Image: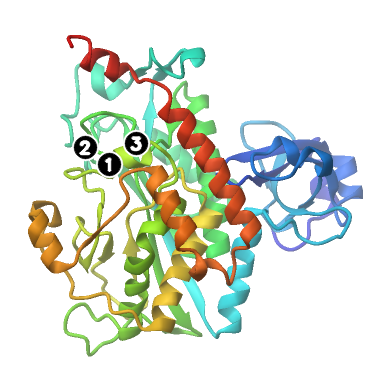
Amino acid sequence: MGASVSKHYFSDLDWIELQFTDLVGSLHGVAVNSRDFNKNLEKGFVKLDGSSIKGFSPIEYSDLLLKPIIKTLAKIPWHEKVARVLSAIYDPYSGKRFSKDPRYVVEKLEAFLENNGLRALVGVEIEFFVFDEIGYNATSYGQDLKIVSMEAHDGIRVPVKSGYYVVEPYDRFAGYRLALSRILREYFNVFVKNHHHEVASAGQIEVNIEASTPLTISDHIQTTKYVAKNIAVQQGKVAVFLPKPVMGDNGSGMHIHLSLWNNSHNLFYDENDRYAHLSQLARYFIGGLIEHGRSLSALVSPTVNSYRRLIPGYEAPIYLTWGKSNRSAAIRIPASLTKTSKRIEYRPPDPLSNPYLAIPAIVLAGIDGINKKIDPGDPVDINVYKLSKSKRRELGIIELPRSLEEALDELESDNEYLKPIFNNDLLESYIEVKRKESRLLQGIPSPSEFVYYSII
């Protein structure tokens, strides 16, 4: 859309929804009429009650200002004369950015990198499910949960863990993915590099978004989830970004591909390296990810359900190791055909993580590894799931946390590496919100417990 929008464009609109993201990654929005939007474009809109957003503001100091980021303005194709625009959050009294605005964290990261002569290139694989129906009793938090997938109950079905790259007629969501990719490109300037059916049998999808800056890719992740949910509704279905919605089948990750650059030079590439053409700087970056991987979990695997995904046997990483093409490792070095595509892939994140917090945290952990020259140890090119506990101990392999509470404990004790960008207020609020969430869900008995313990 560019840095400015013509008044003619606004004449075609009745409403513009100002959208922003909260601490846990949920997208929120408020619609303003196009006349007022045009009139208040520069000074913004005091339209946000921060006390009604988890972890934002106390009730006695709740007014916040939304300023549209005009280059993100895009017409919404499922509504006539309606557009959306992402917004930055400000304190209306001081005129300064609101310190807990997650998007502000990524903006500060890019400034931090630029001041150090660096830039980051980030790509993402987003996995999620599309179901025909989800029914639950809201008062019981899902004790009568019902999930229905067309691929699981009609005459043509995909066996469990056999959905990877299947084609029509077994792939029942090719049309959905085509519609999603087209709308993302034509309306929201988000380019899908490729898409396919994922491993799980019941309607699991992966879309790969073209690599860009940390800020742009974070915006694109939020936009992709927004559009994916709405397209599903238009087709009478529901898009689910829960990391582990189906028992006994693969869960959904949000793998982050990352490289550091100086001008046009990929700092992760070394043509003389015999293992994977990986530079020493990239190895130190990996060392930082391993060093801080347990505390990173609170930001990249941020839900109770995240730790139902992080179990052996489902291509989800539970051990902080690294290796080329090794999908049992938390850090994978994908095969690349050119030096510009040399990168690391961080596999623990899932699609319920807040990209505006998760991506900066990953970068900062790696930067800390570079600054401290943290040795990641030798790469592991075997299936880590098959190693005995004693062998893992012998190799010094660290395990990711087993629960959200454990991850939050790690974040409380290991967060100095985040301090160049994350302020204490944001971290404390995030941890408080997540602890409340964890303790609420821990206190709710699940349907499986009723069945499993019924005979005792």
Q: Amino acid at mark 3?
A: Ala
Mark 3 surroundings: few (<14), some (14-19) or many (≥20) residues within 10 A: some
Q: Secondary structure at mark 3?
A: helix
Q: In the image, residue 2 lies at what x, y percent?
A: 70, 62
Quarter-of-image position of residue 55: top right
- Nearer-N-terminus badge (2/3): 2
In front here: 333 or 54? 54
**Callout in the foreground (1, 3):** 1
Q: Where is mark 3, residue-wise?
A: 174
User: Could you tell whether 271 is left or right of 142 in the image?
Assistant: left
Give the quadrant of the N terminus: bottom right
- Nearer-N-terminus badge (2/1): 2
Q: Amino acid at mark 1?
A: Glu
Q: Name which residue lies at 34% across and 36% down.
A: 174
User: Could you tell whether 270 is left or right of 414 in the image?
Assistant: left
Mark 1 surroundings: few (<14), some (14-19) or many (≥20) residues within 10 A: many
User: Could you tell whether 88 is left or right of 14 in the image?
Assistant: left
Total marks shown come to 3
Q: Secondary structure at mark 1?
A: loop
Quarter-of-image position of residue 117: bottom right
Q: Name which residue lies at 46% across and 38% down.
A: 179
Q: Name which residue lies at 71% across and 31% down.
A: 80
Q: Where is mark 1, residue-wise?
A: 198
Q: CA distance from mark 2 to mark 1?
A: 6 Å
